[in-house]
Amino acid sequence: MNFAKLAILATAIAATPIAASAAGPEVGATVYGPQGNPVGTIESVANGQAVLDTGKHKVPLGIESFGESEAGPTITVTKEQLDGLMDEQIAAAIAQRDAALVVGAAVVSADAQVAGTVKEIDASTDAVVVERDSGLVTLKREHFAVDGNGALIALFTLEQIDGATVATGG
């Protein structure tokens, strides 16, 4: 997924001067926007990243993106702005995936192994049949993504795909 806009947003958030919290955001804390309205709740904090649950999206932000107010942790964007940005990112990722998901496309597994070739796509059910040396496996359109190089990736390891191939009698 292309996170360029999210990175720009995170940079803009981090560049805005606010009184930083010494400990950073805590799990369960409500985060407020620039007008003091709730943006979401911190779901997790690890490795310098906090996941902010807006109710619509779970948005990873660097802990340096958060400031502190009397009400609690703050960021410099509203819930609507953050949700809108995530909607755009998801739409762009889906468009990239759908452009790459065509009959004859090579498929790589989540563990970077050759998984096969797209043999058939059923638009009415979103079923995608992948042909492997060991047989056919049917996955759903949502089980695919595109990497930074435009390669089509099945969101399963090769072992998981082979398990599905055997299970379908492929």
Image (cartoon, rainbow, N blue to C red):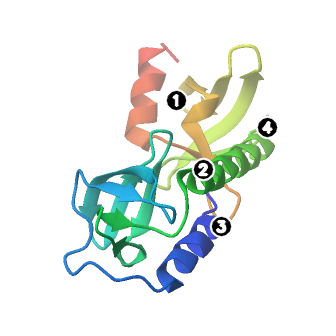
Say few, some or many: other residues with alpha carbon within 10 Å of mark 1 (under 14 / 14 to 19 / 20 or more): few
User: Which residue corresponds to mark 4?
Assistant: 102
Q: In this view, does 41 lie above or below 60?
A: above
Q: Which amino acid does label 4 sit on?
A: Val
Please indicate whether residue 101 sits to the left or right of residue 11 in the image: right
**Disc nearer the start of the sequence (1/4):** 4
Label of residue 80 in the image:
2
Say few, some or many: other residues with alpha carbon within 10 Å of mark 4 (under 14 / 14 to 19 / 20 or more): some
Question: Dot 1: what SS?
Answer: loop
- Mark 1 in CB contact with mark 3 (< 8 angstroms): no
Residue situated in front as seen by the camera: 35 or 20: 35
Q: What's the distance in space between the residues labelled 2 and 3, CA to CA?
A: 15 Å
Give the x, y percent position of residue 128.
66, 26
Q: What residue type is labelled 1?
A: Ser
Q: What's the distance in space between the residues labelled 1 and 4, CA to CA?
A: 21 Å
Q: What's the distance in space between the residues labelled 1 and 3, CA to CA?
A: 41 Å
User: Which residue corresponds to mark 3?
Assistant: 5
Residue situated in front as seen by the camera: 77 or 149: 77
Q: Is residue 81 above or below residue 126?
A: below
Residue 152 seen anywhere in this rendered image of the structure: no
- Mark 1 in CB contact with mark 4 (< 8 angstroms): no
**Disc nearer the start of the sequence (2/4):** 2
**Disc nearer the start of the sequence (2/3):** 3
Closer to the camera: disc 2 or disc 1? 2
Please indicate whether residue 83 sits to the left or right of residue 162 in the image: right
Q: What's the distance in space between the residues labelled 2 and 4, CA to CA?
A: 34 Å
Q: Which amino acid does label 2 sit on?
A: Glu
Question: Dot 2: what SS?
Answer: helix
User: Which residue corresponds to mark 1?
Assistant: 134
Q: In this view, does 70 lie above or below 158?
A: below
